[in-house]
Amino acid sequence: MHSVIEKKNAAVLGLLLLVAVIHAQEPVFRLRDLDNQWQEYGDLKGNKLTVVDFWATWCQPCVRVIPLLNKMAGEYADRGVSFIGVSIDGPRNQSKISSFIHSMGINYISMKDSGRATKQSFRNTLKSF
């Protein structure tokens, strides 16, 4: 079981590294945090790599990957890697986000993209490659 988790970690991190290499141009975005304060990507990014995970409270695949991201965030924090979780929950589910983050034990920065503009910008960037 332990080796399966390590293989998943390696696969996920490998994919994320590939995406980081593809993005020669650093993303620029500004989102609200859980305290409704504006935060900019440049202030949150890691020294070497930043993993941005778009998720929603209703998305089961998203929910299943969060424990792995929590583990990786702890393992790679001292290596200059930061993790940013971005909720794409719409206005109806905004009140659920904080309790969801707490219940999942998310140990990395969490932001809100209720209009999904940042997610769409990332998607458009990837489509251009």
Image: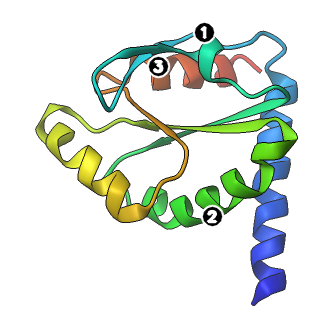
Q: Position of residue 29 (x, y in %)?
A: 53, 12
Q: Which residue is mark 1?
A: 28
Residue extending farthest to the front is: 78
Q: Which of the 4 image quarters holds residue 59? A: bottom left
Q: CA distance from mark 1 to mark 3?
A: 9 Å
Q: Amino acid at mark 2?
A: Leu
Q: Tell me which numbered mark, 1 or 2, is placed earlier along the sequence.
A: 1
Q: Quadrant of the N terminus?
A: bottom right
31 in relation to 89, above or below: above
Q: Secondary structure at mark 2?
A: helix
Relative placement, left or right, of 67 versus 62 is: right
Q: Secondary structure at mark 3?
A: helix
Question: As rendered, which of 99 and 92 lies closer to the eye?
Answer: 99
Q: Amino acid at mark 1?
A: Val
Q: Which residue is mark 2?
A: 68
- Does residue 56 appear anywhere in the picture? yes
